[in-house]
Image (cartoon, rainbow, N blue to C red):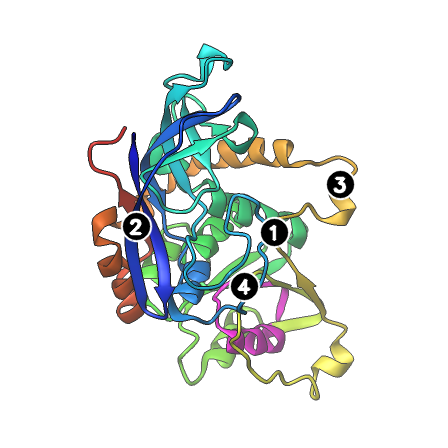
Amino acid sequence: MLVRKSLYFTAPGQVELRQASLPPLAPGQMLVETICSAISPGTEMLVYRGQFPKGLADNNDALSSSLDYPVSYGYACVGRVTKISKDMRHRWLGKLVFAFQPHTSHFIAKPEELLPVPEGISPETACFLANMETAVNLVQDAAPILGERALVFGQGIVGLLTAALLREFPLASLVTCDCYPLRREASLSLGVAATLDPDAPDFRERVRGQLPSGADLSLELSGAPAALDDAIASTGFGGRVIIGSWYGEKKTALDLGGAFHRSRIQLISSQVSTIAPGLRGRWDKARRFGVVWEALERMQPEKWITHRFPIEQAGEAYRLLDTSPEETIQILFKYEGNG
């Protein structure tokens, strides 16, 4: 019987690999051997640090039914179908697939739980699918307008992917912000007008230097609640602030008593698990995934992989993200002998 290794968050700052035997395949099931999986640092670090609301049910059925320790969490696995049940079509055998699946060496899935990876896209590129879907959703919710001035807070992997998509629009200006030089350098390589350090004491003045009338469109993707206050302060009259960060249990005070009261700024929540209500008549998940695969093929985001760890060294990977995030952009887990 096949034994799989699965990553579990067991307490704040603690992860472990647990082994379990996989049951025989039931009708309509396939066995997938994982090649690589991507850490989603914003969400997963909340789980690692214990900053998520305990007992919160997750909207993604592929994940644990509740967020509480011990929890197996993650949602970006790429692997190959190595076995199918007798009733399955052989076209699945050997197929490279993506799954919204916690970090594990092997898993059993049904066809509707898998996304075939298009020809020409590597396993490492495919690992970015979940975060690229988030970036596409953010841009769809933001609905950029010709000639707008845009400002993106946070140049982690979601922020970089979002900025890369926004660069394809005919904006008047695109400015990004991140506190880490490595990520600002990656952002500059996209061709943004400027990238700023939000920790600088004169940060808001620097934003106004780049965007004298304020941003028409700001996206808060840093995961830092205090950045939302900066985003509001940096957005001009009648502008929009798209909030893509999940703050978990982190809280901050917002200054809504000053210019905000008369500014008519819109605060818009954006979350990838659903399609925006205004788009549902024409868009579904399948259509959006088509856009996502095309964007991945154009952008080749594997250039932003800074570290690759064997799954057996998962603890080291999360400690690096926790203590030295300035050294990282995207971390992948590799599964030795798989693929």
Q: Earlier in the sequence, mark 2 or mark 3?
A: 2
At label 3, which amino acid type do we have? Arg
Q: Residue furthest bottom?
A: 257
Mark 4 crowd level (few <14, some 14–19, many ≥20, 10 Å Cα): many
User: Which quadrant of the figure contains the C terminus?
Assistant: top left
At label 4, which amino acid type do we have? Ser
> Residue 299, percent across and down?
42, 38
At label 2, which amino acid type do we have? Arg
Which residue was labeled with disc 2? 18
- CA gap, disc 1 and disc 2: 24 Å
Q: Are marks 3 and 4 in contact (CB under 8 Å)?
A: no
- CA gap, disc 3 and disc 1: 18 Å
Element type where label 4 sits in the image: loop
Which residue was labeled with disc 3? 280
- What residue do we see at 40% from left, 80% from top? 200
Mark number, residue 59: 1
Q: Are marks 2 and 3 in contact (CB under 8 Å)?
A: no
> Residue 290, percent across and down?
57, 30
Instruction: Please state which of the two labelled residues, at mark 1 or mark 2, is closer to the viewer.
Output: 2
Nearest the viewer among 254 and 97 is: 97
Element type where label 1 sits in the image: loop
Instruction: Give yes or no for residue 220 being in the magenta stretch.
Output: yes
Mark number, residue 245: 4
Q: Earlier in the sequence, mark 1 or mark 2?
A: 2
- What residue do we see at 66% from left, 52% from top? 141
Where residue 105 sits, quadrant-wise, is top left
Q: Earlier in the sequence, mark 3 or mark 1?
A: 1
Mark 3 crowd level (few <14, some 14–19, many ≥20, 10 Å Cα): few
